[in-house]
Amino acid sequence: MTLPVIYTIQFCPACDKLRETWDSQGIEYVEKRVDESQEALDEALEYGSAVPIIVYPDGRIEEGEFEGVHG
């Protein structure tokens, strides 16, 4: 099974909300912290510039404010 990838940074309320919501709903994901890895930052910049950036297995991309679960 391929999981959605979320690109996040520390001290990001939208990132925190996304993680908390998905965790409480049992949604599995791979988190990549762009403030801890140049490789993760380079990947994230291919998709957008505002975290959180969500890359779904079907290729859909969402970035910026977290509004809810779309997975």
Image (cartoon, rainbow, N blue to C red):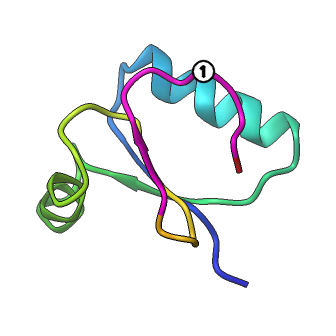
Q: Is residue 39 left or right of residue 9?
A: left
Amino acid under disc 1 = Glu
Please provide the residue range marked out in magenta.
Answer: 60-70
Q: Position of residue 16 (x, y in %)?
A: 54, 25
Q: In the image, what residue occupies the spot 24% across and 55% down? A: 44
Q: Position of residue 58 (x, y in %)?
A: 57, 71
Front in this rendered view, residue 23 or 46: 46
Locate the N terminus and report the quarter of the image it occupies.
Answer: bottom right
Q: Quadrant of residue 35?
A: top left
Q: In the image, what residue occupies the spot 85% across and 35% down? A: 24
Q: Position of residue 57 (x, y in %)?
A: 57, 72
Q: Quadrant of residue 21?
A: top right
Q: How many marks?
A: 1
Q: In the image, what residue occupies the spot 17% across and 55% down? A: 41
Question: Is 22 placed above or below 17 here?
Answer: below
Label 1 secondary element: loop
Other residues around mark 1 within 10 Å, as few (<14) / some (14–19) / many (≥20) = few
| Farthest residue, direction top | 13
Front in this rendered view, residue 41 or 71: 71
| Farthest residue, direction bottom | 1
Q: Is residue 14 left or right of residue 50?
A: right
Q: Is residue 12 left or right of residue 41?
A: right
Q: Which residue is mark 1?
A: 67
Q: In the image, what residue occupies the spot 48% across and 20% down? A: 14
| Farthest residue, direction right | 25
User: Magenta region, mostly helix, strand or loop?
Assistant: loop
Q: Quadrant of residue 19?
A: top right
Front in this rendered view, residue 57 or 21: 57
The stretch drawn in magenta includes residue 43: no
